[in-house]
Image (cartoon, helix red, strand yellow):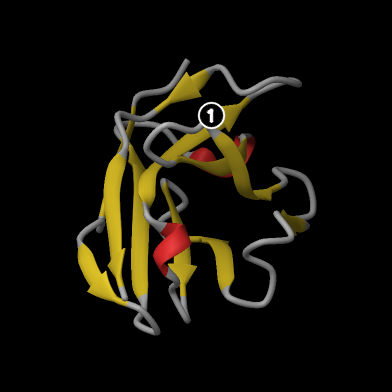
């Protein structure tokens, strides 16, 4: 497992942008498939985006396609989630997760994003 710490969440108005960061201490994340998930109040945690460890391909939930972008940082121990055109329904606690083989087995503590209309 790897220790992950998210940051960048805050309150923003609809239509605004945020960039979330996920950092690992003492580990390079390039060997992991990395994902972002979110959990809105009263709802289950849902998948947002992922970037594969091999080749760097990405995939997104339909609800965020064209608005969110997942990427890896140049330092190789950071992953980002750029969120544009934010909507009130994007309000949630956002978590990053790492998968070494198959399932995500390392999770951060989450960072809260609030989008007001």
Q: Position of residue 84 (x, y in %)?
A: 47, 78
Q: Secondary structure at mark 1?
A: loop
Reply above or below: 52 against 114.
above
- Quadrant assignment for the C terminus: bottom left
* Residue found 56% across the figure and 17% down from its top: 105
- Percent position (x, y) of residue 70? 57, 61
Identify the residue shown where x is 38% and y is 47%.
Answer: 92
Would residue 100 appear left or right of 54 to someone viewing this image?
A: left
From this viewpoint, is residue 110 visible? yes
Whether residue 55 sits left or right of residue 71 in the image: it is right
Quarter-of-image position of residue 18: bottom left
Classify 33 as above or below 58: above
Is residue 69 or residue 92 the one in the foreground?
92
Total numbered badges shown on the rendered structure: 1
Taking the spot 28% from the left edge, 44% from the top edge, the residue there is 111
Q: Which residue is mark 1?
A: 44
Q: Provide residue 25's location: percent of width, then percent of height.
A: 29, 33
Q: Above or below — where is 58 with respect to 117? A: above
Q: Mark 1, residues whose alpha carbon is within 10 Å: few (<14), some, or many (≥20)?
A: few
The residue under the point 47% across, 60% down is: 89
Location of residue 33 (image quadrant): top right
Instruction: Please state which of residues 16 and 3 is positioned toward the viewer in this rendering.
Output: 16
């Amino acid at each position: 497992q790897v220790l992950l710490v998210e940051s960048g969440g805050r309150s923003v108005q609809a239509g605004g942008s945020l960039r979330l960061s996920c950092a690992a201490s003492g580990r390079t994340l390039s060997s992991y498939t990395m994902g972002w998930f979110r959990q809105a109040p009263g709802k289950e945690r849902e998948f947002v985006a992922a970037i594969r460890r091999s080749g760097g391909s990405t995939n997104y939930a339909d609800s965020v396609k064209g608005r969110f972008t997942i990427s890896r940082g140049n330092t190789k121990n950071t992953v980002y989630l750029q969120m544009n055109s934010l909507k009130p329904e994007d309000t949630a606690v956002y978590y990053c997760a790492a998968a070494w083989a198959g399932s995500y087995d390392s999770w951060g503590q989450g960072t809260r994003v609030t989008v007001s209309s």
